[in-house]
Image (spheres, rainbow, N blue to C red):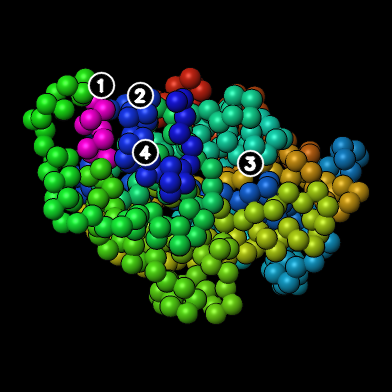
């Protein structure tokens, strides 16, 4: 078995039980690190917006009311740039409000040293001092599956097949197995290739799924049978152990059983026994989850991420906060609203993490330990097509934040003709087309891991470069 993808509950229980030996054949049987031993656990929040986001509306804006940005020219010509923000075409109350405000009439919003497009709401703008925007990143593909998997692992896929482990898997493997669900994937793809079995992603879509993972299956064994099974699992000097543990399979089986018991015997499941009628009030208030909210939507997914991180249930969480951004038509009526909803949710989630005490070892607020990555598979074209849509574009942005990353910062840029990828001076963060370096997902991954004081040797075949400007 060369790769373990995100696991359903059934698949997860197979791994934790009789299926563990199969995973062991490709998972290094190294001792698990205890992530809390350092007193400063590193958490990762990996946020995905699905479909390809418009960076003019988000993290790489242009003032739409300047003449050079008012012509929908496919290629630059005299007086044109091939960049057409068309903010005044957008039918969205949030964007319309930005354009109607004198200070932001251009559609560009400024917070500190960062400029944002008109689809970014105050809830996220309020955290600009913590954010670092990386512009001009080359995604090297216009295919959804490839772009998504490329940024998820930091390695260009093998055809459409993912190559390597997800960033969340790497962090979970490095930080250890102390958490109940070290790597939680909320409506996202995630992969384990060659990392420890406990770091394999557990995929859920809603709170009921998490509750199911943390709740025992089937009928409860009678006390005597359960005690006998427990005694066997804890015994290390048995004939069965000596005869069958040559490849470490028995040890892994017993460790997995112990982990499964720990997961299903605690009280963590009760955290997810909520509903609209039975809310977790501080969390629901922070995320603005009202009586008509969809707990299967972005706010519900953000709630799972918040509880998992706050309560030290997970060290790494990936979560899809937007879907359906592939707007080749009707971009003018739907795209900005989808972005705004996801950014509103994300801003509220960050605010919640800043106020909540971390329940694991290390203390402090949850945000004190959290590194954030926000991405999509690529950007959208700077021109509008004949269907009032935008197509796929290589030059994208991503946003990072965390205790090891400088905030209130922009590095890199796209060109003033057709928003093309530009090279970056990795030390200064400034565009440098002559002597700079192209920035790709592997560089972002390596830099993020460096900021978390974690190794990135699994990316060695990608020749990653560290964006030193963004590191504290």
Q: Residue at x 72, y 35 (%)?
A: 142
Q: Secondary structure at mark 3?
A: loop
Determine which residue is flagged by label 3: 377
Q: Residue at x 17, y 45 (%)?
A: 229
Residue 137 image-quadrant placement: top right
Is residue 22 rendered magenta in the image?
A: no
Q: Secondary structure at mark 1?
A: loop
Marks 1 and 2 close (CB-CB < 8 Å): yes
Q: Is residue 422 left or right of residue 114?
A: right
Determine which residue is flagged by label 2: 25
User: From mark 3 to mark 4, how far is it between C-alphas?
Assistant: 30 Å
Taken as a whole, is the magenta stretch helix, strand or loop?
helix
Q: Secondary structure at mark 2?
A: loop
Residue 375 % position (x, y): 57, 46
Q: The magenta stretch spans which residues?
A: 247-256
Crowding at mark 1 (Cα within 10 Å: few <14, some 14-19, many 20+)? few
Determine which residue is flagged by label 1: 247
Q: Residue at x 34, y 62 (%)?
A: 269
Q: Earlier in the sequence, mark 3 or mark 4?
A: 4
* Quadrant that contains the C terminus: top left
Determine which residue is flagged by label 4: 15
Q: Earlier in the sequence, mark 1 or mark 4?
A: 4
Mark 3 or 4, which is nearer the eye? 4
């Amino acid at each position: 078995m060369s790769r373990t993808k995100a696991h359903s509950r059934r698949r997860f229980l197979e791994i934790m039980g009789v299926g563990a030996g199969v995973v062991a054949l490709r998972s290094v049987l190294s001792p698990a690190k205890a992530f809390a031993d350092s007193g400063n656990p590193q958490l990762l929040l990996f946020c995905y917006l699905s479909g390809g986001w418009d960076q003019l509306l988000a993290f790489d804006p242009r003032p739409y009311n300047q003449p050079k940005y008012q012509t929908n020219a496919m290629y630059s010509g005299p007086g044109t740039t091939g960049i057409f923000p068309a903010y005044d075409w957008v039918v969205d109350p949030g964007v319309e409000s930005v354009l109607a405000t004198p200070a932001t009439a251009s559609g560009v919003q400024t917070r500190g040293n960062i400029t944002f497009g008109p689809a970014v709401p105050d809830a996220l703008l309020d955290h600009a001092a913590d954010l670092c925007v990386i512009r001009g990143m080359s995604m090297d593909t216009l295919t959804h599956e490839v772009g998504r998997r490329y940024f998820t692992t930091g390695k260009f896929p093998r055809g459409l097949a993912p190559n390597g482990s997800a960033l969340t898997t790497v962090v979970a493997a490095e930080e250890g197995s102390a958490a109940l669900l070290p790597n939680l994937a909320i409506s996202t793809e995630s992969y384990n290739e060659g990392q420890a079995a406990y770091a394999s992603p557990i995929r859920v879509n809603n709170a009921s799924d998490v509750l199911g993972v943390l709740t025992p299956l089937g009928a409860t064994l009678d006390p005597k049978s359960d005690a006998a099974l427990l005694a066997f699992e804890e015994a290390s000097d048995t004939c069965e152990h000596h005869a069958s543990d040559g490849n470490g399979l028995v040890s892994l089986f017993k460790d997995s059983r112990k982990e499964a018991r720990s997961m299903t015997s605690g009280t963590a499941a009760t955290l997810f026994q909520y509903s609209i009628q039975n809310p977790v009030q501080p969390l629901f208030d922070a995320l603005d989850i009202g009586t008509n909210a969809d707990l299967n939507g972005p706010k519900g997914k953000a709630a799972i991420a918040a509880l998992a991180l706050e309560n030290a249930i997970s060290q790494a969480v990936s979560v899809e906060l937007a879907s359906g951004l592939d707007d080749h038509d009707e971009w003018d009526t739907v795209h900005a609203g989808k972005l705004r909803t996801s950014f509103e949710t994300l801003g509220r989630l960050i605010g919640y993490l800043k106020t909540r005490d971390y329940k694991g070892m290390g203390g402090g607020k949850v945000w004190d330990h959290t590194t954030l990555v926000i991405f999509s598979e690529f950007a959208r074209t700077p021109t509008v097509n004949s269907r009032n849509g935008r197509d796929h574009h290589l030059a994208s942005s991503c946003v990072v934040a965390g205790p090891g990353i400088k905030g209130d910062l922009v590095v890199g840029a796209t060109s003033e003709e057709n928003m093309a990828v530009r090279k970056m001076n990795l030390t200064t963060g400034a565009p440098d087309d002559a002597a700079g370096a192209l920035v790709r997902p592997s560089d972002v991954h390596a830099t993020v891991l460096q900021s978390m004081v974690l190794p990135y040797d699994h990316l060695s075949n990608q020749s990653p470069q560290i964006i030193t400007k963004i590191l504290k």
